[in-house]
Image (spheres, rainbow, N blue to C red):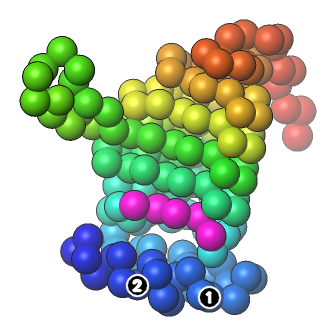
Amino acid sequence: MRVAWVAVDMTLFRYSFHTWNGWRTKVLRTFGAEIAPGCTIRRTARIYYPWNLKLGVISCLGDRCEIYNLGMVTIGDRVSISQEAYVCAGTHDYMDRSMPLVTKPITIKDDAWVCARAFVGPGVTVGTGAIVGAASVAMRDVADWTIVAGNPAVFVKNRPPLSN
């Protein structure tokens, strides 16, 4: 399945016309992704394992973002994953000499925004309405309606809940 996905990703997905979100959605669904209506998936977005992706209503995967979903990545409704953001659901057990792969699911809840070049690490939950600032490294959960920034990402301020 992985070999077939790589072949399709490198051709039919990557070289699709930039407005063909429906086409890219269909291709990803063919490989097991769960994608709700109204999503924007840029042709340069990289999804390693479509069968480990759930994407909510009107969510966006921006240009050159990477969804390294060795474990399940669940993205809620109205979420924006900006350009060159990296969502990584895998790591290694550095306490074991053989460094075995460890996969941990990532959840990015409704109305969240992972800004440009931000990194979201294994096992992290980005809360409802939360923002992970540009070039930040979120290795711990991000609380609902907060803004975090930096490396490591730390609390900056609260974000007011959306009114509409």
Spot occupied by residue 63 in the image (x, y as percentages of width and height): 69, 62
Q: At 38% across and 39% down in the image, what residue appears?
A: 89
Which mark, by number, is residue 94?
none
Extreme-front residue of the structure: 97
Residue 103 appears in the rendering: yes
Quarter holding the N terminus? Answer: bottom left
Residue 113 appears in the rendering: no
The stretch of residues the image draws in magenta is 44-48
Spot occupied by residue 54 in the image (x, y as percentages of width and height): 45, 54
Q: Residues within 10 Å of mark 2 (few under 14, many from 20)?
A: some
Spot occupied by residue 148 in the image (x, y as percentages of width and height): 72, 19
Q: Residues within 10 Å of mark 1 (few under 14, many from 20)?
A: some
The magenta stretch spans residue 164:
no
- Return the residue at label 1: 16
SS label for mark 2: helix
Q: Amino acid at mark 2?
A: Val
SS label for mark 1: loop
Quarter holding the C terminus? Answer: top right
Say left or right for 62 vs 106. right
Which mark, by number, is residue 8?
2
Spot occupied by residue 68 in the image (x, y as percentages of width and height): 43, 50
Q: At 26% across and 30% down in the image, what residue appears?
A: 92
Instruction: Count the marks.
Output: 2
By secondary structure, the bulk of the magenta-drawn segment is best described as loop
Query: On screen, 114 above or below 130?
Result: below
Say left or right for 126 vs 163. left
Q: Amino acid at mark 1?
A: Ser
